[in-house]
Amino acid sequence: MLSAAVVRLRLRVLRRHLRLRGRRRSRRRSRRGDGEEEEGGREPVLLVSGMGGSVLHARRRSNPKFDLRVWVRILLANVEFKKYLWSLYNPDTGYVEPLDDDVEIVVPEHDHGLYAIDILDPSWFVEILHLSMVYHFHDMIDMLLDCGYKKGTTLFGYGYDFRQSNRIDKVMVGLRAKLETAYKASGGKKVNIISHSMGGLLVSCFMSMNHNIFAKYVNKWICIACPFQGAPGCINDSLLTGLQFVYGFESFFFVSRWVMHQLLVECPSIYEMLPNPKFKWKEAPIVQVWRKNPEKDGMTELVMYEATDCVSLFEEALRNNELKYNGKTIALPFNMSVFKWATETRRILDNAELPDTVSFYNIYGTSYETPYDVCYGSESSPIGDLSEVCHTMPVYTYVDGDGTVPIESTMADGFAAKERVGIKADHRGLLCDENVFELLKKWLGVKEESTRCRRLSKSKVADFVP
């Protein structure tokens, strides 16, 4: 099984190498052409990443020279993650703060914000192997450059500390500054935003809280794989057992599920993606637990928790959760302060209104089994104490979606969309899907300047026009 995984990895490396070589050649040809004239009339594009989609560095206040990439990193992933990214939520400020007071987490601003969302681990190890799991906006950036966009003039990126709330001041101020920069650099042209995943919630928060500013600077907003009403199966389970970004052979290089869990319990951004209890789901998402009932002589029964009831489960299951840091034991129960903050964020999201001057487009993934309901334990092997749930592998009930977010959530944006289009691709795969690229070029009104042939995916496209 390991050998098969290695073969698949090597095939991906070869395909990516050939594709990148073709793009580099075409870009050199286009730079020799007359693309500069077209560039002058082009509206700028701002790429906004989602959960886990930004490079994060750790710096020490006591040592200005210390600068270490802690997310994403393949080598020593767990060690550096626990040392620098494990955090606690501060209810007085609303920010997630490192356990080490000497550490601050920053997003590198190199390459006009594009560096932080391009290849998330730009190390020599990844460069040699071309590990696809960390190639984030890379292919899309290449495509836009092939269309004649220029970094710092018409192409920008916005990475941010995704541990924080989607409405926290620093993130909102940063997005406004990036919009203003793109607007001015392009000669006063409105910006076209392309957001991925949780980045869509961040943009929605900004639009709700800064409606007039959004209308002033934004022309089009293209949203990809956004969990508008939450990601029920993935997020409910992430608060109980953790979150795994990659599977199979590649998972050996990545942060472990439980190490990630100990961060997520304190992250407002995760709580903000819990299923919206006020949304009218076709069938309300549930969490089920097979457990022994001590009041009935230990008889096994199936206990069901709906979205509005899950808080009691989270509190009970996480009541003894803790981590070890520098020889100290730190309690990490379900954080009600974070939950209350996230509840206000949900209200802000529900009140978001699209300005009449902004065109909205929605791309969502289809044809992948997507976790929806979650079940722990079984009739033959029930849960005794609810704290055991945190160390139990979940069993999912699946619906259609991109493998992370159900279609029902991604389509329920609540805006007057120009188009909603389903693409047969998974959550991260949408960022490098050729059919997605064709839609982007159509909606942006651009075309690639090279005449090279590119291998198109065979993904199906389903249009929905309101």
Image (spheres, helix red, strand yellow):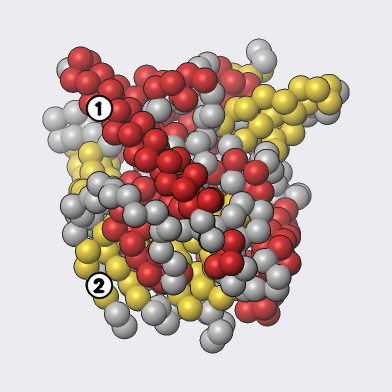
Quadrant holding the C terminus: bottom left
Amino acid type at circle 1 is: Leu
Q: Residue drawn 68% across and 41% down?
A: 110
Residue 194 in picture, x, y percent from top left: 49, 61
Q: As rendered, which of 358 and 208 lies closer to the eye?
A: 358
Q: Dot 1 surroundings within 10 Å: few (below 14), some, or many (20 or more)?
A: few
Residue 138 in picture, x, y percent from top left: 46, 43
Q: Is residue 317 visible?
A: no
Q: Which residue is mark 1?
A: 11
Q: Residue drawn 40% across and 78% down?
A: 417
Residue 22 in picture, x, y percent from top left: 37, 40
Amino acid type at circle 2 is: Asp
Q: Which mark is residue 302?
A: none
Q: Which residue is mark 2?
A: 463
The answer to whether 368 appears left or right of 212 in the picture is left
**Which dot, 2 or 1, sits closer to the camera?**
1
